[in-house]
Amino acid sequence: MKKIIRNVAFGVIGLSVAAASVAGPEEDRQAFRKFYENRFPQVQPFGDFQNGVYSILPAAREQWEAIEEFPPYELSIERGEQIYNKTFANGKSLKDCFGEDGAVREKYPHWDKSRGMVVTMELAINECLEANGEKPLKYKKGAIADVSSYMSYNSRGQILNVEIPSDDPRALAAYEMGKEQFYTKRGQLNFACADCHMHTAGMMYRADTTSPALGHATSWPVFRSKWQEMGTLHRRFAGCHTNIRANPYKAQGEEYRNLEYFVSYMSNGLEFNGPAARK
Amino acid sequence: MALGLAMVAPVAFAGSGTTAEHIEAATAAYKQVAKETGYQWTVSVVAIKAAKKALEAGDDKLARKLAHDAMDLVEATRTQAKLESETWKMRVPK
C-alpha cells in the first residue's frame, strides 16, 4: 500500500504543461482550442469537434454515420415531446417555463446572479416541475434525459455562448472550481479529466479511444451503446469518476454544475448537436 | 478513542487496539479526509466493508490486515489531495 502513496507522488512528475494560473477564462479558452487544433489538425472544419471522438477516428465515424440514419435517440425525443406537452395538475406545462418548443439549449448553462450558482438545463427542468407542484425527475437517465433530448433536438444549430459575467466574482469562482475539477487527478487510478481527454486524447485505453474535451458539452444527452439507453452529462461525469475509483459527486450538485460550466465555456463557438449517439 | 480518531496523520496501528477499533479508525479517517478535501476513493469503502465482513466472520487476522489496507488507501487519498492542490495548475495549457 505504501506503493500507492509513492505512485501517487510519481504520477505528478512528468506532467509538463506550462502553468497558466493567472490567465482568465478567455485566455484559457483560446489556449484550450489551440491545444486541440495543434493536436488534431486533421479535424476540419473546426466545428467538427462537436462530433466528439468521431471527429478524430475515420473508421468509427463511418459506423456512427450509419447509426445516425436510424438514430437510437429518436424514441427518446418522442417520449420527451410527450412529457414536454403534458399538462401539470395545475393546468400548466413545461411550455410555460421554456416556450412552445423548448429550444432554449443556448441559454444553458448560465450563471444565476440572484442565487449565486450555475444553472443547467436539467436543473431548470426540475425547478420548473417543482415550481408547478410536480415531482422532480432523477437526474441521470429516464424522463429527464427524454425531455432534455426533445429540447436539445429543437435547439440544434444553436451556438454555445456561455458567459462569465464580469460584475459577479462568484461566477468566476464557479468557473475556476470547474476548471480545477477538470485538471485535478482523483481516484485510486489517479486520473484527471485532462489526462484522458486532453493530454492523451486520441489514444487508446484498453479498447476505447478517448475523445477530445473540446466539443464535449455540445451533444448531450446521449444514447450510449454501453448503457443501451439515454443518459445525461452528469451521468457521464459520475461514470468517469467511478471508472477511476473516485466516489462520484451528486448529479446536479455544485461540483458537476461548475464542471459543466467550465467544459461548456471551453466549447464556446461550437454548435449544439444533441441528442447524440456515442459508444 | 484509543487510536486518536481526531488526528488523521499516518497512524501507527501495529500492536495497539482491537481490530474493531482499527476498522473504526479507518472509517473515521475516511470520513475526515472526505470532509476536509472532497476526495474519496471507492476502493477505500470496499476495503472497510471487507474488513467488517471478515471480522464478523471471525477472521481477525484478515480483518486487521484489511483495516490496515483501508487506512493506507485513506492516507494515499490524503496525499493525492495535498499534491493535487499544489500541482493541478501545471496541467493547464498556456
Image: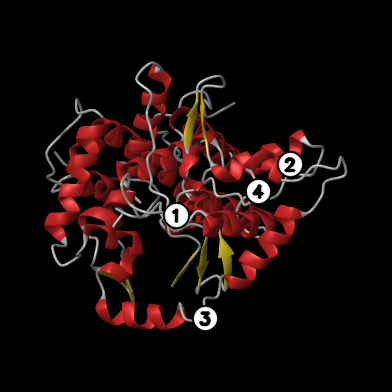
Label 1 vs label 3: CA separation? 35 Å
Image location of residue A94, percent across then percent down: 71, 45
Label 3 vs label 2: CA separation? 31 Å
Pick the residue in front: B6 or A17: A17
Labels 3, 2: one chain: yes
Residue at 69% x, 58% y: name it. Answer: A143
- Amino acid residing under circle 2: Leu
| Residue under pointer 3 | A70
- Report the side of A86 relative to B57 (left or right): right
Pick the residue in front: A259 or A7: A259
| Residue under pointer 1 | A245
Image location of residue A1, percent across then percent down: 35, 51
Q: Quadrant of residue A86?
A: bottom right
CB-based contact (under 8 Å), mark 1 and mark 3: no
Who comes first in sequence, dot 2 or dot 4? 4
Image location of residue B76, percent across then percent down: 36, 43
Labels 2, 4: one chain: yes
Image location of residue A244, percent across then percent down: 40, 56
Give the label on residue A129, or none: 2
Labels 2, 1: one chain: yes
Residue B61 visible: no
